[in-house]
Amino acid sequence: MKYSALLLTLMLAACAAQPTVKSWMDPKSSVTVTAQTEPLVLIRAAPAPGLNERDYAQLTAIEINRMGERKLYLVAILWNSGDLWPDQAGAFQNAFKQIEVNLGDRTVALTPHTGEASELGISEALPLPIPGSSQIYFPISRDDLRAISRSSRIELTANGVPDAPRRYEEWQDGRRSLDDFLGQLPEIRPQS
């Protein structure tokens, strides 16, 4: 009887602990994609003119493994709580042509991958439980990802539109998932 209660407790704990990192093979390119599943969610500091309408930027780290050649990206998944007109949606995406992630003690400047996602080996949108229609891939180093995971506060400035920066503040924490993601990456061994 006492073992039944222990077993039930362990089973419930396993059900409650959802994985925070997911890996899959792209069906067309056969690259292995690994991603954190709980993103950092940032909300635009200045509300949109519409009632209850806000811009969001979700940041999730991914690794693309193409036969042992590994590359890291910070993916910005953009969405808005309202309906955007086509010109508004274009301005929203254009703002992310250059971003700065402010971590308090340092700033990480990122420029997006300029080609198609298929060039990275991604044939379809990331199959993550994250809403959003636009996915922008920013090459990033492991050290910069580690700095993001260790920061106490994250702010993002989208500088892609001259003289019209868009500032985003942290709204939902995803550092545990980012830590788990970084923890499963293979160690980098210095070449001798």
Image (cartoon, rainbow, N blue to C red):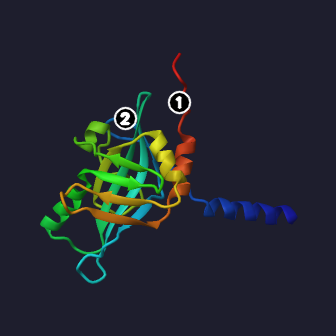
Q: Could you tell me which residue is drawn at 27 percent across and 84 percent down?
A: 51
Q: Residue furthest left?
A: 87
Q: Which mark is residue 15?
A: none
Q: Residues within 10 Å of mark 1 (few under 14, many from 20)?
A: few
How far apart marks 1 and 2 lie (CA) works out to: 23 Å
Q: Could you tell me which residue is drawn at 32 percent across and 64 percent down?
A: 167
Question: Residue 30: x percent and y percent?
Answer: 37, 35
Question: Mark 1 or 2 closer to N-term?
Answer: 2
82 left or right of 45 in image: left
Mark in the foreground, 1 or 2: 1
The residue indicated by pointer 1 is 188
Q: Could you tell me which residue is drawn at 48 percent across and 41 percent down?
A: 143
Q: Give amino acid for label 1.
A: Ile
Q: Which mark is residue 30?
A: 2
Q: Secondary structure at mark 1?
A: loop
Closer to us: 99 or 27: 99
Q: Secondary structure at mark 2?
A: loop
Q: Is residue 26 above or below residue 128?
A: above
Closer to us: 56 or 155: 155
Question: Residue 170: x percent and y percent?
Answer: 43, 65
Q: Residues within 10 Å of mark 2 (few under 14, many from 20)?
A: some
- Determine if residue 20 is in view: no
Q: Residue furthest front?
A: 105
Question: Residue 9: x percent and y percent?
Answer: 74, 64
Q: Are marks 1 and 2 in contact (CB under 8 Å)?
A: no
Image quadrant in which you'd find residue 87: bottom left
Q: Give amino acid for label 2.
A: Ser
- Number of numbered tags placed on the structure image: 2
Report the quarter where the N terminus lies: bottom right
